[in-house]
Amino acid sequence: MAIINRATKELQLKIVYYGPAKSGKTTNLEQVHTNVQVPDTTQKGKMTSLATSSDRTLFFDFFPLEATTIKGFKTKFSLFTVPGQVIYNATRQIVLRGVDGIVFVADSQYDKMGENIETFGHMQDNLKSLNLSLEDIPYVMQYNKRDMGEVAPVEYLEYVLNNREVHVPFFEASANKCEGVFETLNMITKLLIHKYLNK
Amino acid sequence: MPFPQLLEADMQFFDKVLSELVRKSEALLTMVVEKAGYLIHQYGNAEALDTTTLATLGSNAYNATQFMAQLVNEHNFTSMYQQGETYSTLILNIDENCILVVIFGTDQTVGSMKYYAAPAVKRISEQLKLASARGETALDLCDMDATDVQALFRRV
């Protein structure tokens, strides 16, 4: 749910990185946080991670990111990740609250295909419980871990995960090398801005 | 119901209400936060505090505790309190979309915070209702050049 503050001339949007466990959601945020160009580094938002002792996301990772001012409106994006493990499904639902755009981070490895499909289904269920739907929320697919062995061809991933009425943009990525990370981020932010452009 | 668009008058109203709350209660910091985690307005001494992160953590903590309460059939969930050694935090529900976060020194009591915060919550809630009743005006980005958003973020 975007926040439009005409007093401060700010548009605030929430983007959630969703995907199965260890698919690279936190790595995406870390790479953006480390590598994003900002006019003033002292003004760069802090990345907050609520993780377990073994460094797995327990609740969420959060990073506020400010874009250049567009037509007088300062656009602020809040980037979140959800925990990937199924036991934290209730937590995922809480993080999805008020989401404006989603990046689905899929693990490209063949043996992770079942988890990708299951997690996508959980995401749809969680959105439904919040009276939201993928038909109304811009989202993009990221096929991560392309640098690993035994990865499925993109055509296969597309057939399995992106085979709905609306075919959404997809990106190949190796988030640990920061490949495909900014392309994905720029596409989802573009889709969100265009949503307001076309209103 | 979506979160209403806010105007200068709304922000001035929030500022007035929060400043009165800080003055009367002697709280350190007060924040109006949208439940998805956005900081709407703050008043008080935020020096050395990252209020953006505080707002996000506060809203998610509140949502999580509310979820937990619902699991034990406790549906009347309107506040939560974290007791600290130097500073404590009280979070109060404003409406469907918003919470009030109050951070105060442990020399103050949670009872007095609740006493002073209750009318503030009511006034903020009423202002938000007024803002909602104004209706939505489309955000005027129509003369924006679509190429402006081809690559909002660049890698160093």
Image (cartoon, rainbow, N blue to C red):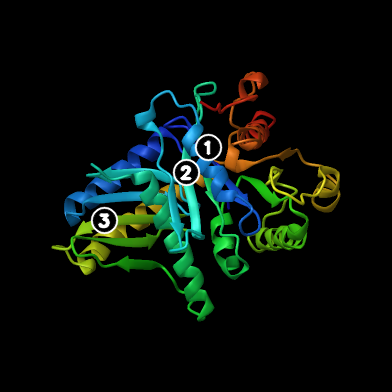
Residue A48: percent from left, percent from top = 42, 49
Specify the amino acid type for callout 1: Val
Q: Name the residue under label 2.
A: A63
Residue named by callout 3: B103
Tell me where residue B26 sits by quadrant: bottom left
Q: How many labels does the image show?
A: 3
Residue annotated with mark 1 = A32
Name the residue nearer the viewer: A141 or A34.
Answer: A34
**The one of A52 and B8 positioned closer to us in this rendering:** A52
**At 54% from the left edge and 64% from the top edge, which residue is drawn?**
A91
Q: Do labels 3 and 2 share a chain?
A: no
At numbered mark 2, what does the secondary structure look like: helix, strand or loop?
strand
Q: In front here: A146 or B52? A: A146
Task: Give the CA distance from mark 1 to mark 2.
Answer: 9 Å
Badges 1 and 2: C-beta atoms under 8 Å apart?
yes
Name which residue type carries label 3: Ile
The numbered dot on residue A101 is: none
Query: Chain for mark 2?
Result: A
Q: Are marks 1 and 3 in contact (CB under 8 Å)?
A: no
